[in-house]
Image: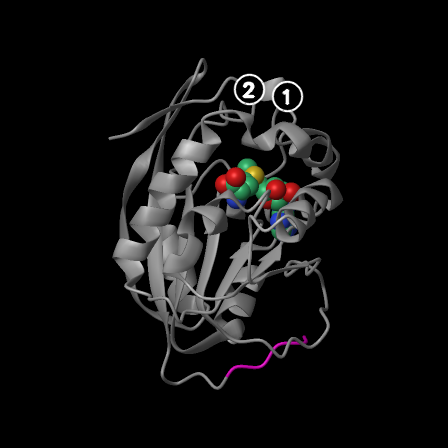
Amino acid sequence: MHHDHDPHRPDHDDHGPASFDERAATWDDDAKVARSGRVADAVLRATGVDRSARVFEYGAGTALVTEALGDRVGPSVLADTSAGMREVMATKVADGRLPRSRVVDWDLGADSIPSIADRFDLIVTVLTLHHVDDVDRVLGRFADLLAPDGRVAVVDLDAEDGSFHGDGFTGHHGFERDDLVRRLVAAGLDEVTVSDCGVLERDEGTFPMFLAVARSSQARTGGTGS
Ligand SMILES: C[S@@+](CC[C@H](N)C(=O)[O-])C[C@H]1O[C@@H](n2cnc3c(N)ncnc32)[C@H](O)[C@@H]1O
């Protein structure tokens, strides 16, 4: 298992869009870069996508995972609800660190979203789903956005006791793997597999992560905008 030493204390951590905006400029300064490299390798191994894959990273932060995927995948669309994170990503696109990437402000958890014409061979979301209010709605929209034979890759925390974020956090305390599998299937995805994906080590404890991969269902025809 891999160990990340994230220096951020819980009270500096992920309590909402404002704190992500504030943290965006220094997001890449610590163990997240190495972690993202390992996550990218694991996602590639588990999904088998290739250099032609159209990628969507949701809750991308500063797009460390897409950066680490590099030219092993095709063009990418990067979404995050934090304007500060989108600004950092836009800088990386402009200075060439994210060639063939486009930054968007899609909030797939919103009640309604504009119609999205893009379809993706790989949708990846890392440590974001536990911040999303309506997980099932977002998973359903992922399913809609997949191309035939596309893959969704979710990396997140295993169920924890709330100490990861500390008091005041209103998101999810990680996920039970079986429950997430059930929700991926309910969203219309197939062939779900779940594997270990390293740990996050903090003063508050050791937090295991999982990688869940699911495939677009043959039965689905797609369609977003609701
Ligand atoms: C813990 S960070 C992870 C960032 C990045 N995936 C990484 O691994 O470095 C969670 C990210 O999710 C974003 N986020 C929070 N709620 C979101 C939502 N409902 N939809 C999309 N992004 C969201 C935050 O702005 C933040 O960038």
Q: Is residue 90 above or below residue 100?
A: above
Q: Quadrant of residue 103?
A: bottom right
Image-based side of 89 in relation to 154, left or right: right
Q: Name the amino acid type tagged 2.
A: His
Instruction: Residue at 61%, 26% (x, y): give it.
Output: 13
Q: Residue furthest top?
A: 203
Instruction: Residue at 34%, 40% (x, y): give it.
Output: 38
Q: What's the coloring here?
A: one colour
Query: Picture coordinates of residue 32 (x, y %)?
Result: 47, 32
**Who is closer to the viewer here, 82 or 156?**
82
Query: Quick check: is 11 in the magenta stretch?
Result: no
Badge 1 is on which residue?
12
Circle 1 residues within 10 Å: few <14, some 14–19, many ≥20: some
Quadrant containing the N terminus in the rendered view: top left
Mark 2 → mark 1, Cα distance in angstroms: 6 Å
Q: Is residue 4 above or below residue 91?
A: above
Magenta residues: mostly which secondary structure? loop
Image-based side of 49 in relation to 107, left or right: left
Circle 2 residues within 10 Å: few <14, some 14–19, many ≥20: few
Badge 2 is on which residue?
8
* Span colored in magenta: 222-226
- Residue 102 is at least partly visible in this image: yes
Q: Which secondary structure lies at badge 2?
A: loop
Query: Picture coordinates of residue 107 (x, y %)?
Result: 68, 58
Query: Picture coordinates of residue 18 (x, y %)?
Result: 75, 34
